[in-house]
Amino acid sequence: MTQSKEIQNSDQFAAFRHSSYKRFFIARFLTAFSFQAVSTAVGWHIWVETENPFWLGLIGLVQFLPALLLVLVTGLVTDRYSRRIVMACAIIGMATGSLSLCVMAASGPFNPVWVMAVLAGFGVARAFHSPASSSLVVNLVPKADFQNAIGWVTSSWQLASIFGPVAGGLLAAYSRTAPYLCAAILMSLAAMLIISIPKPPQAINKKKIDVGVLLGGFRYIWKTKIVLGAITLDLFAVMLGGVVALMPIFAKEILGMGPSGLGWLRAAPGVGAIAVVIWMTKFPIKDHAGTILLVAVALFGAATALFGFSTSVWLSLFALLLIGALDMISVIIREVLLQLWTPDEVRGRVNAVNSIFLMASNELGDARAGFIAAKWGAIITVIGGGIAAVGVTMICGMLFPELRKIRQLDKDI
C-alpha cells in the first residue's frame, strides 16, 4: 500500500473530502430523519386510535410487500439507469406520501385502512430508494475510502434514528399534522440535493434482459457464501429480535410514557449505534471480523431479552442503547462485505436483493411482533424473540463456517 493510501485510510473523515459524498450524506440523513419521524407519529396515532397490536404489525407488512414484489425491477432499474435520478425520484415519492398523511391527519381521526394504503406507497418508493442509495455511495468515493464512506453513511441512518423519533414524538404531541408536513418539506430538500450531485461514474449493465440478467443479484449472493451468511444472519436475528413495532405498547402500557417518551425509546438504539460508528471509523475492524460479527449478534439477542424483562425506564433505555450498538457492528461488517466485493455492474441487483432481506428483517419482523403480541402479549414476544436471535446466531455459525473464519474485510476471499 502506498503512503498516500495509508494516510487516506487513517483519516476518520476521508469520505467527506469528496463534495458529492457530502451532499449524498446530508440527503440520506434528511430522508431517514423524515421517515423515522413519520414512522413514530404513525405508530402512535394508530395505537391511540385502535389499541390493536395487529395494526402496528401491519404497518411493517404493507411496506415490505412492495419491495418483495418489485425486487427484480428495482435492481435492474438501479443497474440500467442513473442511480442518482432513481434515488431522487424515490425520495419525491416518499415526500408525496408524507403530504398525503398530513392531509389525512388534518381531516380528522386516521382511518387505518387508508393509512395502510399510503404506507404501501411508501413501500414502493423505498423499494427503489434502498438499492439506488446503497449502490450510489460507492460511485462517489475512491475504493480506498469505501469502508469509511459506508461507516459514515450508515451513521446517517442512525443519527436519524436518534433525532427523527424524538422529533416525531414531540411534533405529534404538539400537532397531528406537524410531523408529516415537516417530513414532506425535508424530503423535498433531500431530493434536490441528490439531483445537484454531478453525474458520477457508473458501470451500466447493457446486456439484453433475460432471466439470467434479472436473477443476477440472487445468483451472485448465492455463490458468495460469506455474503449469503452475513445477510441470512441479519435477516433472522433482527426479524426475531426486533422491538420497534411494540415500542408504543411499552411506552404507554408498561413504562407509563407518552408520545415524547416513545420518541426517546425509539432514539435510544441510534445513540448506541452512533457511538459504535464514531469508534469504528477511527479504529476499523482489521482482524477476526467473522467472530466479532457473530458475538455482536448473539449479544444483540441477549439485550433484546433484557428490554423485554425491564419495567424500568432507565434499564429499558440502557438495553436499547446496547441493541443499537451491537446491531451497528453487524451492519457495518455486512455492508462492507457486500459493497466492496460486489462488481459495480451487478451492484444494483445485489443491493435490491439485500434490501429485501433488510426490509424483511425490519418490516416483516415488525409484522411478526405485532401479530404474536396480539395473541401472547408484548413482553413474551420480545423476550422470546431475543432468545431466538441468540439461537439463530449459533445456527448460522455452523451453517456458514466461511463467515465464522473470515478475518479481514478489505481483501477478497
Image: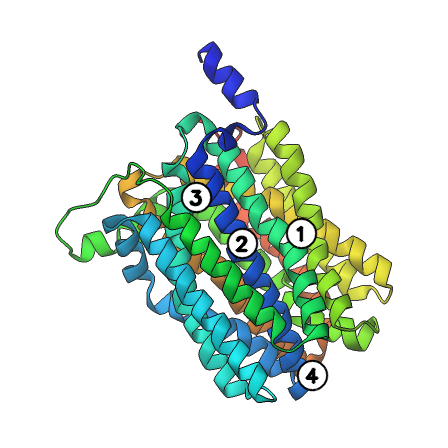
Discs 4, 1 touching: Cβ within 8 Å? no
- Foreground residue among 2 and 53: 2
Amino acid type of disc 4? Val
The answer to whether residue 202 is left or right of residue 20 is left
Three-letter code, disc 2: Leu
Real-space CA distance between mark 4 and mark 3, rounded to the nearest whole angstrom: 41 Å
Quadrant holding the N terminus: top left
Number of residues whose C-alpha sits closer than 10 Å to that of mark 3, classed few (under 14), some (14–19) or many (20 or more): many
Q: Earlier along the polypeptide chain: callout 4 or callout 3?
A: 4
Tag of residue 227? 3
Which residue does the image show at 12% across and 51% down from the upper left? 208
265 shown above or below 85: below
Q: Which quadrant, please, contains the C terminus?
A: top left
Give the distance between the C-alpha atoms of the residues marked 2 and 3, in whole angstroms: 29 Å
Instruction: Say whether marks 4 and 3 touch (CB < 8 Å).
Output: no
Asked if labels 1 and 3 touch by Cβ distance under 8 angstroms, the answer is no
Q: Quadrant of residue 10?
A: top right
Local SS, label 2:
helix
Mark 1, residue position: 270
Q: Nearer the viewer, residue 216 or 206?
A: 206
Q: Residue 46, located in which quarter of the rendered image?
A: bottom right
